Amino acid sequence: MNEIPIEFASEADLSGIMDLYKQCTRYLIAQGIDQWDHNYPDLSTARQDILNKDMYVMKMRQNILGAIVINEQQDMQYNDVRWKISSENPLVIHRLCINPNLQFRGNGKRLCLFAEDYGTMNGNDTIRLDTYTGNPTAMNFYRKLGYTQASGHCFYHGCSQAFICMEKRIYTN
């Protein structure tokens, strides 16, 4: 099977990205996970991610099958986290999602490895992210990829549980 290409998201992809976010939100809610809802992620956030050239998508025949946002923007709550890896230039993963029908097939891992390669090529030494404690599948996913938990957590958009902060050292050239 051919790998699904990963490319910059464009304004033309916006409708497909929002459809993907809606599919993933419905899937999470059906699993009893209130990580995302009908207000987040929203159209203006996705549009800004595209304009900033921070969003990458997995796309096949104009269908958006996965998405990831990577940049150096750390939420202000990250200032209160005790990171185990000292980093001057971390890359941050936001809003990773895969079409629910294509999950558990290595696509999320491919997007994370893409982020690690991107970070290595751009001089980032660490990747940071936060993941919802109410989503044990996501927490285990990141642990299997070598991410470790930092000391601290964040709270976002009315979720009932905290988001743990995780990090991974990547190596620069």
Image: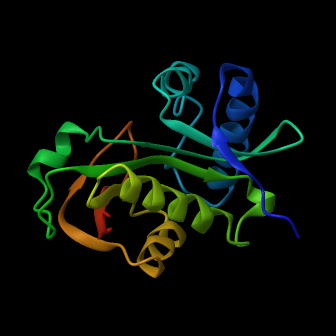
Quadrant occupied by the C terminus? bottom left
Quadrant of the image occupied by residue 171: bottom left
Count the numbered circles shown.
Answer: 0
Residue under the point 31% across and 55% down:
162
Residue under the point 61% across and 51% down:
97
Horizontal side, residue 17 vs residue 92: left or right: right
Residue 99: x %, y % from top left: 74, 52
Residue 30: x %, y % from top left: 68, 55
Query: In the figure, 115 relative to 168: above or below?
Result: above
Q: How is the image coloured?
A: rainbow
Horizontal side, residue 19 vs residue 170: left or right: right
Query: In the figure, 40 relative to 7: above or below?
Result: above
Which residue is at the front of the view, 66 or 54?
Answer: 54
Quadrant occupied by the N terminus? bottom right
Residue 110: x %, y % from top left: 61, 64
Which residue lies most toward the front here? 173
Horizontal side, residue 162 vs residue 87: left or right: right
Residue 64: x %, y % from top left: 76, 41
Which residue is at the front of the view, 77 or 111?
Answer: 111
Residue under the point 54% across and 56% down:
33
Query: In the figure, 105 relative to 127: above or below?
Result: below
Quadrant of the image occupied by residue 2: bottom right
Query: In the figure, 76 relative to 91: above or below?
Result: above
